[in-house]
Amino acid sequence: MLKVVSHSEAETEALGAALANLLRPGDFVALSGGLGAGKTALCRGLVRALGSEECASPTFTIVHEYDCDPPVYHFDAYRLNNADELYEIGCEEYFARGGIVLMEWPEKVEEALPKEAVRLFFAGVGEGERLIEIDGLGPAREEALKAAGVC
Ligand SMILES: Nc1ncnc2c1ncn2[C@@H]1O[C@H](COP(=O)(O)OP(=O)(O)O)[C@@H](O)[C@H]1O
Ligand SMILES: [Mg+2]
């Protein structure tokens, strides 16, 4: 488990970009934390680093697909009530495509998630500051993230 304090939206985006370099096709990233915690900001940095420009909150569409390398499937489960509703939109097919999956509000659909996931937990710790805990990267990637200077 790594703990990072981000002091700005730009720092959170930079953490996303650093993570992008360490993720592999097929990785699943769950992002937990309240509204405005910075989940989408981190996803924006991550997706941009993989070569896709625009990254808005997918709240109204549940899933946004980014045509980068590897492709990214960015879900926001905020409006879902349970795992069945995620299955209904074909999540298993997305999960099996070998892209990177980003899931905001994973606790809404916990039963549908793969057991192996990188887990991020966001908490506000003052205006403009966020504590971000990162679990499930494994020791080698934790070291690489530290070496990247973002935590
Ligand atoms: N350190 C920080 N990291 C990320 N966002 C921050 C930070 N400090 C303030 N913010 C603000 O918090 C909001 C985060 O929004 P967003 O990323 O959409 O959150 P979420 O997806 O978790 O609901 C933005 O308005 C951003 O400017
Ligand atoms: Mg969001």
Image: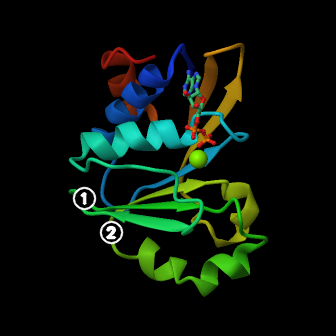
For this rendering, which residue is in front, 80 or 131?
80
Element at badge 2? loop
**Residue that sits furthest to the right in the current view:** 81
Q: Quadrant of residue 145?
A: top left
**Residue visible at 71% across and 23% down in the picture:** 124
- Colour convention: rainbow
Query: Whole-percent x and y of residue 16?
Result: 40, 35
Query: Whole-percent x and y of residue 18?
Result: 33, 31
The residue tagged 2 is 98
Could you tell me if residue 70 is visible in this image?
yes
Tell whether 41 sits left or right of 132: left
Q: Kindly indicate whether the residue at mark 1 contacts the one at mark 2 (C-beta within 8 angstroms).
A: yes
Could you tell me if residue 136 is visible in this image?
no
Query: Whole-percent x and y of residue 83?
Result: 71, 74
Q: Residues within 10 Å of mark 2 (few under 14, many from 20)?
A: some
Q: Quadrant of residue 88?
A: bottom right
**Residue visible at 26% across and 39% down in the picture:** 49
Q: Quadrant of residue 20?
A: top left
The amino acid type, in three-letter code, at marker 1 is Pro
Mark carried by residue 70: 1
In the rendered image, the quadrant that contains the N terminus is top right
Give the vertical position of 136 relative to 99 (above or below). Answer: above
**Residue visible at 78% across and 70% down in the picture:** 81
Give the vertical position of 65 relative to 20 (above or below). Answer: below
The amino acid type, in three-letter code, at marker 2 is Gly
Tell whether 42 sits left or right of 131: left
